[in-house]
Image: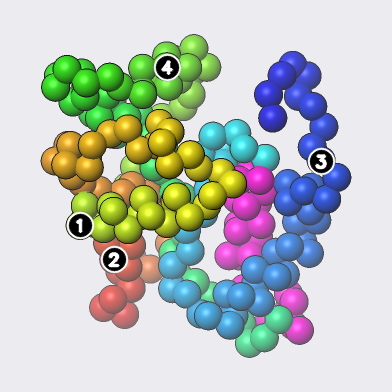
Amino acid sequence: PEGDPLPPLPEGCFALQDVDEAAGELVRLIRTFKPHVVTTYDENGGYPHPDHIMTHKISMVAFERAGDPSYYPEAGEPWQPLKLYYNQGFNRERTVALHEALLARGLDSPYGQWLERWKEHGQRERTLTTYIPCADFFEIRDKALIAHATQIDPDGGWFRVPMDLQKEVWPTEEYELAQSRVPTSLPEDDLFAGIRNN
Protein backbone atom coordinates (compact mmCIF):
# COMPACT_ATOMS: atom_id res chain seq x y z
CA PRO A 1 0.00 0.00 0.00
CA GLU A 2 1.10 3.53 -0.77
CA GLY A 3 -0.15 6.94 0.31
CA ASP A 4 -0.28 9.19 3.35
CA PRO A 5 -2.18 8.08 5.25
CA LEU A 6 -1.88 4.49 4.07
CA PRO A 7 -5.16 3.01 2.88
CA PRO A 8 -6.73 0.29 5.01
CA LEU A 9 -5.74 -3.27 4.23
CA PRO A 10 -8.41 -5.42 2.59
CA GLU A 11 -10.53 -7.46 4.96
CA GLY A 12 -9.35 -11.06 5.24
CA CYS A 13 -5.86 -10.40 3.85
CA PHE A 14 -2.88 -12.25 5.27
CA ALA A 15 -1.49 -9.13 6.98
CA LEU A 16 -4.58 -8.95 9.20
CA GLN A 17 -4.58 -12.57 10.40
CA ASP A 18 -4.32 -13.39 14.09
CA VAL A 19 -0.61 -13.95 14.82
CA ASP A 20 -1.11 -16.68 17.43
CA GLU A 21 -3.55 -18.63 15.29
CA ALA A 22 -1.38 -18.40 12.17
CA ALA A 23 1.74 -19.27 14.20
CA GLY A 24 -0.06 -22.42 15.36
CA GLU A 25 -0.40 -23.50 11.73
CA LEU A 26 3.30 -22.85 11.11
CA VAL A 27 4.24 -24.73 14.29
CA ARG A 28 2.24 -27.70 12.98
CA LEU A 29 4.25 -27.59 9.74
CA ILE A 30 7.56 -27.21 11.57
CA ARG A 31 6.71 -30.20 13.76
CA THR A 32 5.68 -32.20 10.69
CA PHE A 33 8.67 -31.44 8.46
CA LYS A 34 11.27 -30.92 11.23
CA PRO A 35 13.50 -28.29 9.58
CA HIS A 36 16.83 -27.49 11.17
CA VAL A 37 16.84 -24.04 9.56
CA VAL A 38 14.04 -21.51 9.03
CA THR A 39 14.29 -18.48 6.75
CA THR A 40 11.91 -15.54 6.84
CA TYR A 41 11.66 -11.80 6.25
CA ASP A 42 13.13 -9.28 8.67
CA GLU A 43 10.88 -7.02 10.76
CA ASN A 44 10.54 -4.66 7.79
CA GLY A 45 9.46 -7.45 5.46
CA GLY A 46 12.48 -6.90 3.20
CA TYR A 47 10.62 -3.76 2.22
CA PRO A 48 7.49 -2.62 4.03
CA HIS A 49 5.05 -5.09 2.46
CA PRO A 50 2.28 -5.85 5.01
CA ASP A 51 2.13 -9.56 4.16
CA HIS A 52 5.91 -9.88 4.47
CA ILE A 53 5.85 -8.13 7.85
CA MET A 54 3.14 -10.54 9.03
CA THR A 55 5.26 -13.44 7.76
CA HIS A 56 8.08 -12.17 9.98
CA LYS A 57 5.83 -11.92 13.04
CA ILE A 58 4.37 -15.39 12.56
CA SER A 59 7.76 -16.97 11.84
CA MET A 60 9.31 -15.50 14.98
CA VAL A 61 6.50 -16.80 17.21
CA ALA A 62 6.55 -20.22 15.55
CA PHE A 63 10.35 -20.53 15.81
CA GLU A 64 10.16 -19.84 19.56
CA ARG A 65 7.17 -22.09 20.25
CA ALA A 66 7.69 -25.11 17.99
CA GLY A 67 10.00 -26.79 20.49
CA ASP A 68 7.88 -26.00 23.55
CA PRO A 69 5.30 -28.72 24.35
CA SER A 70 3.14 -26.25 26.29
CA TYR A 71 2.26 -24.42 23.03
CA TYR A 72 -0.10 -25.91 20.47
CA PRO A 73 -0.09 -29.46 21.90
CA GLU A 74 -2.51 -30.49 19.13
CA ALA A 75 0.14 -29.56 16.52
CA GLY A 76 2.32 -32.64 17.07
CA GLU A 77 5.50 -33.57 18.90
CA PRO A 78 7.74 -30.59 19.70
CA TRP A 79 10.57 -29.84 17.30
CA GLN A 80 13.04 -26.98 17.72
CA PRO A 81 14.70 -25.59 14.59
CA LEU A 82 18.29 -24.64 15.35
CA LYS A 83 18.81 -21.52 13.22
CA LEU A 84 16.66 -18.69 11.93
CA TYR A 85 17.75 -16.39 9.10
CA TYR A 86 16.34 -13.24 7.54
CA ASN A 87 16.34 -13.25 3.73
CA GLN A 88 18.40 -10.25 2.63
CA GLY A 89 18.25 -10.27 -1.16
CA PHE A 90 17.33 -6.57 -1.12
CA ASN A 91 20.66 -5.41 0.23
CA ARG A 92 22.52 -2.25 -0.67
CA GLU A 93 25.90 -3.95 -1.20
CA ARG A 94 24.51 -6.26 -3.90
CA THR A 95 22.42 -3.53 -5.50
CA VAL A 96 25.37 -1.12 -5.76
CA ALA A 97 27.62 -3.83 -7.23
CA LEU A 98 25.11 -4.77 -9.93
CA HIS A 99 24.24 -1.11 -10.65
CA GLU A 100 27.88 -0.14 -11.13
CA ALA A 101 28.61 -3.22 -13.25
CA LEU A 102 25.69 -2.44 -15.57
CA LEU A 103 26.77 1.17 -16.01
CA ALA A 104 30.41 0.13 -16.59
CA ARG A 105 29.22 -2.07 -19.47
CA GLY A 106 27.16 0.77 -20.96
CA LEU A 107 23.85 -0.85 -19.99
CA ASP A 108 20.82 0.74 -18.35
CA SER A 109 20.43 -0.05 -14.66
CA PRO A 110 17.06 -0.63 -13.01
CA TYR A 111 18.65 0.21 -9.65
CA GLY A 112 19.30 3.96 -9.85
CA GLN A 113 15.90 4.88 -8.41
CA TRP A 114 16.16 2.17 -5.74
CA LEU A 115 19.44 3.60 -4.53
CA GLU A 116 18.01 7.13 -4.47
CA ARG A 117 14.98 5.96 -2.46
CA TRP A 118 17.27 4.21 0.00
CA LYS A 119 19.18 7.44 0.45
CA GLU A 120 15.98 9.53 0.82
CA HIS A 121 14.34 7.18 3.32
CA GLY A 122 17.51 6.52 5.29
CA GLN A 123 16.95 2.78 5.05
CA ARG A 124 19.10 1.06 7.64
CA GLU A 125 21.83 -1.24 6.45
CA ARG A 126 21.31 -4.85 7.42
CA THR A 127 24.10 -7.08 8.72
CA LEU A 128 24.81 -9.67 6.08
CA THR A 129 26.23 -12.71 7.84
CA THR A 130 25.79 -15.51 5.34
CA TYR A 131 26.67 -15.58 1.65
CA ILE A 132 25.52 -18.74 -0.13
CA PRO A 133 27.29 -19.44 -3.46
CA CYS A 134 24.47 -20.40 -5.80
CA ALA A 135 25.11 -18.85 -9.22
CA ASP A 136 24.66 -22.29 -10.81
CA PHE A 137 21.03 -22.18 -9.68
CA PHE A 138 20.09 -18.61 -10.66
CA GLU A 139 18.09 -19.78 -13.70
CA ILE A 140 16.03 -22.11 -11.49
CA ARG A 141 15.56 -19.30 -8.94
CA ASP A 142 14.23 -17.03 -11.68
CA LYS A 143 11.85 -19.69 -13.03
CA ALA A 144 10.44 -20.10 -9.52
CA LEU A 145 9.95 -16.35 -9.23
CA ILE A 146 8.25 -16.12 -12.64
CA ALA A 147 5.89 -18.90 -11.57
CA HIS A 148 4.49 -16.40 -9.03
CA ALA A 149 2.45 -15.12 -11.98
CA THR A 150 0.20 -12.62 -10.19
CA GLN A 151 3.19 -10.83 -8.66
CA ILE A 152 6.06 -10.84 -11.14
CA ASP A 153 6.30 -9.44 -14.67
CA PRO A 154 8.68 -11.70 -16.61
CA ASP A 155 9.66 -8.66 -18.69
CA GLY A 156 10.04 -6.38 -15.65
CA GLY A 157 12.97 -4.96 -13.72
CA TRP A 158 13.69 -8.16 -11.79
CA PHE A 159 15.03 -9.73 -14.96
CA ARG A 160 16.87 -6.84 -16.61
CA VAL A 161 20.32 -7.80 -15.35
CA PRO A 162 21.95 -10.29 -17.76
CA MET A 163 22.49 -13.68 -16.17
CA ASP A 164 26.21 -13.82 -17.01
CA LEU A 165 26.72 -10.43 -15.30
CA GLN A 166 24.87 -11.59 -12.17
CA LYS A 167 26.97 -14.73 -11.96
CA GLU A 168 30.21 -12.79 -12.39
CA VAL A 169 29.50 -9.78 -10.18
CA TRP A 170 27.33 -11.22 -7.40
CA PRO A 171 27.20 -15.05 -7.38
CA THR A 172 25.60 -15.43 -3.94
CA GLU A 173 22.32 -15.12 -2.08
CA GLU A 174 22.54 -13.31 1.25
CA TYR A 175 21.05 -13.90 4.67
CA GLU A 176 21.24 -12.40 8.13
CA LEU A 177 21.58 -14.87 10.99
CA ALA A 178 18.91 -13.76 13.46
CA GLN A 179 18.99 -16.64 15.96
CA SER A 180 21.15 -19.69 16.46
CA ARG A 181 20.93 -22.45 19.01
CA VAL A 182 24.25 -23.93 17.84
CA PRO A 183 27.76 -22.43 17.86
CA THR A 184 28.72 -20.87 14.56
CA SER A 185 31.23 -18.30 13.34
CA LEU A 186 30.57 -15.45 10.97
CA PRO A 187 30.62 -14.93 8.09
CA GLU A 188 29.10 -18.19 6.88
CA ASP A 189 28.76 -19.75 3.44
CA ASP A 190 26.36 -22.49 4.57
CA LEU A 191 22.95 -22.14 6.22
CA PHE A 192 23.70 -25.40 8.05
CA ALA A 193 27.03 -24.26 9.50
CA GLY A 194 27.24 -25.49 13.08
CA ILE A 195 24.51 -28.07 12.47
CA ARG A 196 26.22 -30.50 10.09
CA ASN A 197 28.73 -31.63 12.73
CA ASN A 198 26.23 -31.91 15.62
Q: Which residues are magenta?
A: 51-74
* Amino acid beneath label 4: Gln
For marks 3 and 2, give the CA distance.
41 Å
Q: Residues within 10 Å of mark 4 (few under 14, many from 20)?
A: few
On the image, numbered disc 3 is attached to which residue? 10
Of the numbered discs in the image, which one, if any, rests on residue 193?
2
Q: Secondary structure at mark 2?
A: loop
Asked if the residue under mark 1 is in contact with the one under mark 2, i.e. CB atoms within 8 Å, the reply is no
Counting residues from the start of the chain, the first of labels 4 and 3 encountered is 3
On the image, numbered disc 4 is attached to which residue? 113
* Amino acid beneath label 2: Ala
Residue 67 in view: no
Among the 4 quarters of the image, the one containing residue 103:
top left
Where's residue 48, x and y in %? 60, 34
Where's residue 11, x and y in %? 85, 45
Foreground residue among 30 and 70: 30
Counting residues from the start of the chain, the first of labels 2 and 4 encountered is 4
On the image, numbered disc 1 is attached to which residue? 136
| Quadrant into which the C terminus falls | bottom left
Above-or-below relation of 7 to 21: above
